[in-house]
């Protein structure tokens, strides 16, 4: 699966090639009949989809309809990431509107969720070894890498409580998109390493330690009824934000900035498409599948001018004194290491073996006395 989440050219779908016959070279002599038959098949499939598409569909209450300047329509399905009813809402919407594009709140780093089940997620969360820690740190840095590991534990906790893995609505969207002729599938979320790095950069070292501690000791029971009550917010994000309500910077990076990014990718998808047989431009129909907590932000941003570059960069760290920064960083790593030890067995020992931590410990050692 090679979907990307940035450019319109990377939209993919089971029938994408079939809609681009006009770009093919002229057929050799003797094959024109096959070419014409293929073109007629494309047009026929297009007509079949048009007949299936309902002009005034009765959609679930979780669906919001937005219109682009060129007349393209976006049906935004607000979901709870651990919800059977959200899966039904997604299936109902895609079947009714027969979209040209389906956009989901995933990035290329989380595309594996499309095939993840409860057993796999729990196994991944419990099997936190040195290789996984090193990979997360190499990809995101020490702080955000360890935070990623701990967030996996939060997701596993919810999965274990409910007996279902997150992302069922995304898997349903992928399945239903494959049944719609010419429908493309788009990963629409900001890359998760960028979100982690910006979130961590927005916190002080003491706040990072408190956040890691709260994530490590998450143990409150969650019921399926709680999930359905959380239709107004994303359950995983709400669980986090309830623990870290005193950190407004995290809400900005985890929710508000991603609202902007999701709006950007949804607007890219909601562009006119070429209809056979004359490749004339017609308004597109798009289905977006996002956590309910993102719906108000997408509605607010829909008609605004957006600057994506501002939310794709990571601000440089503040200039503290060398000694203060080193001591505080050592303390945070110690807390994170203990939290990871509690969460993953031998993870604390694995943390101490990392080159970045070894380098920090070397910096903390006193310098040898100067020669007389």
Image (tube, rainbow, N blue to C red):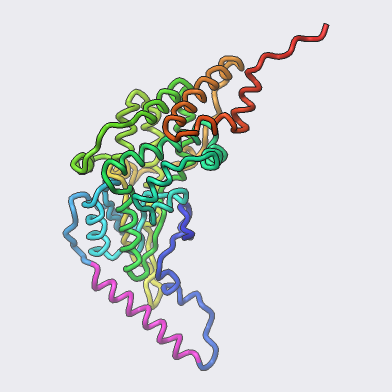
Residue 295 point in image, percent of width and height: 29, 44
Residue positioned 29% across, 58% down in the render: 73
Towards the viewer: 247 or 44: 247
Residue that lies at the very extreme toward the right in this rendered image: 372
Observer-nearest of 302 and 199? 199
**Residue at x 32%, y 48% (from the top left corner):** 165
| Residue in front for this viewpoint, 37 or 228 | 228
Residue at image position (44%, 91%) is: 33
Whether residue 357 sits left or right of residue 215 in the image: it is right
Q: Is residue 49 magenta?
A: yes
Is residue 14 toward the left or the right of residue 369 in the image?
A: left
Q: Residue furthest bottom?
A: 30
Residue 361, given in percent of the width and then of the height, sits at 62, 22
**Relative height, residue 265 to residue 33 (above, below):** above
Q: Which residues are drawn in magenta?
A: 31-53
- Vertical placement of 271 versus 119: above or below? below
């Amino acid at each position: 699966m090679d979907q990307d989440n940035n450019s319109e050219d990377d939209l993919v779908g089971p029938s994408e090639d079939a809609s681009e016959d006009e770009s093919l070279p002229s057929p050799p002599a003797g094959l024109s009949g096959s070419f014409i038959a293929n073109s007629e098949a494309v047009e026929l499939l297009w007509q079949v989809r048009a007949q299936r598409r309902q002009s005034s569909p009765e959609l679930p209450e979780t669906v919001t309809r937005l219109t682009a300047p060129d007349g393209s329509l976006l049906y935004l399905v607000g979901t709870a990431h651990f919800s059977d009813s959200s899966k039904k809402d997604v299936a109902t919407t895609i079947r009714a509107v027969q979209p040209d594009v389906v956009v989901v709140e995933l990035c290329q780093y989380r595309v594996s969720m499309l095939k993840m089940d409860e057993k796999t997620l729990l196994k991944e969360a419990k099997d936190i070894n040195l290789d996984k820690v090193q990979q997360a740190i190499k990809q995101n840095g020490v702080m955000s890498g360890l935070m990623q590991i701990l967030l996996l534990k939060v997701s596993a906790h919810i999965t274990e409580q409910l007996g279902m893995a997150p992302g069922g609505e995304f898997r349903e969207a992928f399945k239903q998109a494959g049944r719609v002729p010419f429908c493309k599938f788009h990963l629409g979320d900001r890359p998760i390493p960028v979100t982690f790095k910006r979130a961590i950069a927005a916190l002080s070292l003491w706040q990072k330690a408190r956040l890691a501690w709260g994530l490590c000791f998450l143990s409150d029971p969650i019921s399926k009824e709680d999930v359905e009550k959380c239709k107004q917010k994303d359950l995983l994000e709400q669980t986090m934000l309830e623990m870290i309500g005193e950190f407004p910077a995290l809400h900005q990076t985890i929710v508000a900035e991603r609202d902007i990014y999701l709006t950007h990718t949804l607007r890219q998808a909601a562009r006119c498409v070429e209809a056979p047989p004359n490749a004339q431009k017609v308004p597109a129909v798009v289905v977006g599948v996002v956590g309910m907590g993102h719906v108000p932000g997408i509605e607010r941003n829909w008609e605004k001018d957006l600057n994506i570059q501002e939310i794709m960069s990571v601000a440089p760290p503040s200039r503290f004194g060398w000694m203060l920064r080193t001591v505080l960083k050592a303390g945070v790593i110690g807390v994170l290491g203990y939290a990871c030890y509690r969460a993953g067995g031998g993870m604390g020992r694995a943390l101490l073996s990392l080159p970045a931590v070894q380098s920090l410990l070397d910096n903390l050692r006193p310098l040898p006395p100067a020669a007389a």
